[in-house]
Image (cartoon, rainbow, N blue to C red):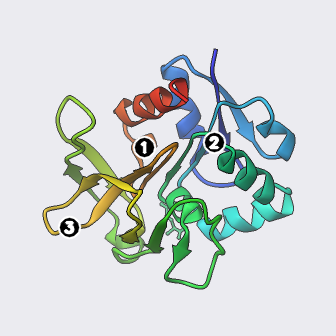
Amino acid sequence: MRKIGVLAVQGDFAEHIQALSKLEVETEEVRLPEHLSDLDGLIIPGGESTSQSRLMEIYGLTTPVIESVGNGMPVWGTCAGMILLAGKLVEPHPVPLGLMDTKIQRNAYGRQVDSFETDVSVPCLSGGDFRAIFIRAPKVVSVGSGVEALSWSSDGDIFAVREGHMLATSFHPELTNDLRFHEYFVDMVNSS
Ligand code: GLN
């Protein structure tokens, strides 16, 4: 039985755990380095990337997460998680984990009132468009050649990226009842 951890220092980790439970996947709330030891995959949830970054540092999680993912543990970041996984940010804070070959801009679609929902096409998921919830969402400014776009708008904005065992979405599948992105990540974990 595979076990997926969800970084649980801040943000909407409970929603990810609920989605994984619906898929009958064993989960673990990750707050301390020892919680990473028997995991097959990790999710970094939506929330506030500066708070998550600071709390990860306080709990001694930053280096262990970088090492685990660097050693091949599948990871998925949603929204703030996409920011933390980035190679580079446009902003000086937080310092991202530097795991993906991406450059990301925080809050690129406006402030909280400008949060929005829209249907996006995700060709790798069967069953039609995905209802995407964007909350102070980051924008993918650029990606390296090893990064595959999984979803993009007609004007070229990228909403979801995959780089080998690493996945990131600028929106929040955990806030919908659509489990297809969670299934996609569970498949990544199962095939790793
Ligand atoms: N804007 C937030 C940040 O910079 C991310 C928002 C979210 O995760 N919904 O961390």
- Residue at x 45%, y 41% (from the top left corner): 174
Q: CA distance from mark 3 to mark 1?
A: 24 Å
Identify the residue position indicated by label 1 in the image. 175
Q: As shown in the figure, which amino acid type bears the numbered disc 1?
A: Leu
Residue 28 at x, y percent in the picture? 71, 32
User: Which residue appears at 20% of the width and 67% of the height?
Assistant: 156
Quadrant of the snapshot with the N terminus = top right
**In this rendering, which labeled residue sits more in front, label 3 or label 1?**
3
Q: Outermost residue, front direction?
A: 145
Q: Earlier in the sequence, mark 3 or mark 2?
A: 2
61 horizontally vs 80: left or right: right
| Dot 3 amino acid type | Gly
Q: Amino acid at mark 2?
A: Gly
Q: CA distance from mark 3 to mark 2?
A: 30 Å
Contact check, label 3 and label 2, Cβ < 8 Å:
no
Q: Which mark is residue 72?
A: 2
The residue shown at (48%, 32%) is 188
